[in-house]
Image (spheres, grey):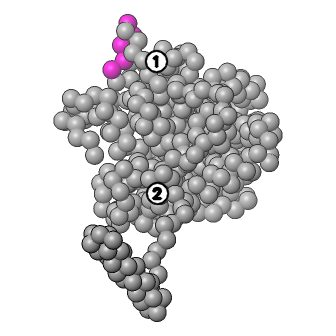
Amino acid sequence: MRLSQVCRIQILGFGLIVLMAVAITIQILGIHFPRRSPQISPLRLVTVPQPSHRTCQPKRHVMFLKTHKTAGSTILNLLHRYGDRNGLIFALPYKYQFNYPNSFQSQRVKGYNASSRPHYNIMCHHMRFNYPEVRKVMPPDSFYFTILRDPATMAESSFSYYRAVSSAFKKAPSFKAFISHPSQYYRQGERSNHYARNPLWFDLGFNSDVPFTETYAKAGIRAVEDAFHLVLLAEHFDESVILLKDELCWHLDDVVTFKLNSRSTSRPLERGEINRLRAWNTLDWYLYSYFNRTFWDKVERFGRQKMDDEVKKLKERRRYLAKLCLEGSEPVGAEQIKEEAIKPFQFGQEKILGWAVRKDLPPEIRTRCVRMVTPELQYKDLLDARQFPMRASNGSVATVR
């Protein structure tokens, strides 16, 4: 046997002895090496896997009428994210609203030119709806939807938020006093009183001060049904976004949201107060009652069991992303959020809450998490800077945050 072969055998034998000694030591000391986690990494979990049997095509032309105090800010965030992620073009206002409370006019869209008819994918910022003018801007195949809320709870929120600007709310010494005698404080045509009576009717473009008649109310409902493909309900937000997801042929992660623009406190209403507020906002209550019925008709056609399953998946996904993205499970005051890009705008007499995002996330994941909690004003600035890179909407040099 050659000397080299003898040496090789000796080396292998020595190595085997060393490995056996290490194994015995590990066993004696009780050392355990961590196994690879069977969970998918956070990078993979940013987008939930989707079934491959879908036959519909995602809709890219969407018009959302954002009504006031109806969870519209949360809907706005999912539209912002979807359009941002897919490079879609937004019909943007010059500031943050389309000259609200005046009726919408197409020339209020930044960059719009009636002769060249620029292409837009999404329109979603505050306006007083004017269907003929909106149709000048949005493609003919656009999907129109809006969201409603029970006018009683909506009135409580509006009083808190708009008391400083609405003449009727400002005159009332308290919300309880306003509920007791709203006509004592309300004067038609006074400053910002569209927030104080039938605000949904007003946002939809109708005259909110016309005395209620069933003929007039039914005519308004027919106009809404002619313009809008889907009407969501704030009180049934999860079911609403599942219907929206199905109509738009979007994915689950496209409609997962965290609640935005919420208040720190709210005042529970007594049954008598609810009835008086609904009676004061008769047109809104008639509107809400009608679309509450048609909403559940849509759920029945969708399938109750299917809806329950989809809502369960939505809630599970929201819980997972909250744990992944957020520093806490509850929204916090603006003073606890250090990043200006996600700090909620403060307006009204109540604190507006937001979310703090974890800082120990990989950059790609953190960017997506931040987008999920970016308030509408900051996100509008981001979109504005992307579409008009030379200057931001306020005339200063744009900086993308």
Which residue is disc 1 drawn over? 137
Task: From the top left corner, tell me how far across and down residue 72 is, in percent.
Answer: 53, 43
Most foreground residue, 104 or 170 = 104
- Quadrant where the N terminus sits is bottom left
The tag earlier along the polypeptide, 2 or 1, is 2
Horizontal side of 386 relative to 289 (left or right) equals left
Task: From the top left corner, tell me how far across and down residue 280 is, in percent.
Answer: 66, 44
Q: Secondary structure at mark 1?
A: helix
Q: Quadrant of residue 361?
A: bottom left
Q: Which numbered tag is attached to residue 88?
A: none
Of marks 2 and 1, the one in the foreground: 2
Q: In the rendered structure, which segment of residues is drawn in magenta?
A: 111-115
Which residue is disc 2 drawn over? 42
Residue situated furthest top in the rendering: 115
Q: Is residue 324 magenta?
A: no
Disc 2 to disc 1, C-alpha distance: 40 Å
Q: Residues within 10 Å of mark 1 (few under 14, many from 20)?
A: many
